Image: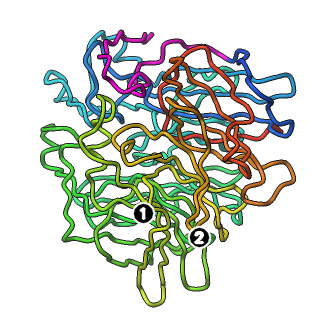
Amino acid sequence: MTTATKQTMSSSAPGWLRAFRTLPRQHGFEPLRVEGQVPEGLRGSLYRVGPWTFDVHGRAYQHWFDGDGGMLGVRFGADGVTGASRLLDTPTMVAEREAHSQQYGAYGTPTPLLHKIRNVRKNSANTSVMAWNGKLYALFEGSIPVEVSQDDLSTLGETDFDGTVVETFSAHPHRVPSRKASYNFGIRYGRETLADLYALPDGGKAQRLGTVKLPGATMVHDFIATDRYLVFFLSPLRLNLFRMLLRMGTYSENLRWKPEAGTEVLVVPIDDVAHPVRITTDAFYLWHFGNAYEQGDTLVVDYVRYPDFTTNQWLGELVHGATSLDAKGMLHRAVVDLKARTFRTEQRLDVSCEFPRVAPGVVNRENQTVYVGTHRSDEARRGLFDGVARVDMATGRMTTAPLGDGTYPSEPVFVPRPGGSAEDDGWVLTQVFDAKTDTSHIAVLDARHMEDGPVARCHFDHALPPTFHGGFAPAK
């Protein structure tokens, strides 16, 4: 079992830095203290995943992406609210814990010299969740899915969906409601860099759609789907495969920014994978998409855009304290013209932000609203995100939720009100670290009145490390 490592922090350290500690207590579902009133229509379960260890046997990880995954679950029921938090237990994680010494490298942490000869990657299961066909999975883009028990968040085991997954399975599957299926990809490096494309039909078995060649050994974190297309923005990152083969340096250190190559917009027809559309545009980077929809021969795409890959340095420095760089992510809306083969993009918000989400009812449909995590001031851009907001994509108007001083929310997740259809007719759930109390809670916000603050806070009696991504499973 992994236990929390005692950390000593200076009195000048920012309050949010205490969130980056190994999960102090693991437990199944137990009652949470509720402050305020949970809306009667909010019924179901919130699941979230993130890196929840920050060292391995006393050796600090060097990047936020490196830790072993942990999952939180919060059930909203007629009888109250319960919560669970556990570290996940993939075979490689367990082997390393039992070895009493570091066995594997990670995204930004070197592989120990004695273990470099092995070509084994650790499945950290630390990035996102997927609910599919009645089962719950933790996802990590460098490996295969990990099934998790919905009863107590214990780890059930890894799966390649009966041999369907060739090598890796991204942490960002996207659903296409019109097809009653979700889609995903996995990256393979070699003489050519390939993306394996997958379909996960409702009630059916996972399928491999085909494989698409990428323009180089790039890193792809996310994509987005429309009714007919899978859309990738492939940044001009290039991985030094020779150094990786010799186990020289970390994955992160071996990524190089090559702006002269430009960013490739890759549009893959779901029904004709062999004939993608490729458009080259000016270099930019992105981690996450918000939504995409079709308008005739054009695609409208919401995403958070970065001018370069210094965002990687920002993320690596964050777990050690205030960063040397400002966060640079800005919310954009792009228009991809498939007939004219053009790409246009426009900034819609002049505020540092990340983790864009939309209401489930407008996935693949024209949307006016995007929910994001934000920095509430320019000074805050060298620290953890400290706000959540609703953004009107037509006007750029932003409505921020007041959560209180010293509070640091994670990605906002929109939950529609039963019977509701408007993009703000429901609630926004966000995991919040409170630096004043050194505990965490789930804040429940009325999406239409976010400026009023939380209608309820569901308190854990301990701190939870930040999470990257999550989802809500409505009660049946």
Q: Position of residue 281 (x, y in %)?
A: 32, 76
Outermost residue, bottom side = 340
Q: Tag 2: Cα neighbours inside 10 Å, few (<14), some, or many (≥20)?
A: few
Quadrant in the picture for the C terminus: top right
| Vertical order, 200 against 411 (above or below) | below
Q: CA distance from mark 1 to mark 2?
A: 39 Å
Quarter of the image holding residue 299?
A: bottom right
Left or right: 285 as drawn, with respect to 16: left
- Provide the major secondary structure of the magenta segment: loop
Q: Nearer the viewer, residue 44 or 92?
A: 44
Q: Is residue 144 visible?
A: no
Q: Position of residue 67 (x, y in %)?
A: 37, 28
Q: Tag 1: Cα neighbours inside 10 Å, few (<14), some, or many (≥20)?
A: some
Based on the picture, tell me whether residue 17 belongs to the magenta stretch: yes
Q: Is residue 434 visible?
A: yes
Question: Type of residue at label 2?
Answer: Thr
Left or right: 368 as drawn, with respect to 266: right
Q: Residue at 74% of width from left, 35% of height from top? A: 455
The residue that mark 2 highlights is 395
Secondary structure category for the residue under label 2: loop
What stretch of residues is rendered in magenta? Answer: 1-28
Q: Position of residue 316 (x, y in %)?
A: 29, 37
Question: Type of residue at label 1?
Answer: Thr
| Vertical order, 331 against 227 (above or below) | above
Q: Nearer the viewer, residue 349 or 54?
A: 349
Quarter of the image holding residue 351?
A: bottom left
| Vertical order, 75 against 242 (above or below) | above
| Of pointers 1 and 2, the one earlier in the residue sequence | 1
The residue that mark 1 highlights is 211
Q: Position of residue 10 (x, y in %)?
A: 29, 16
Quadrant in the picture for the N terminus: top left
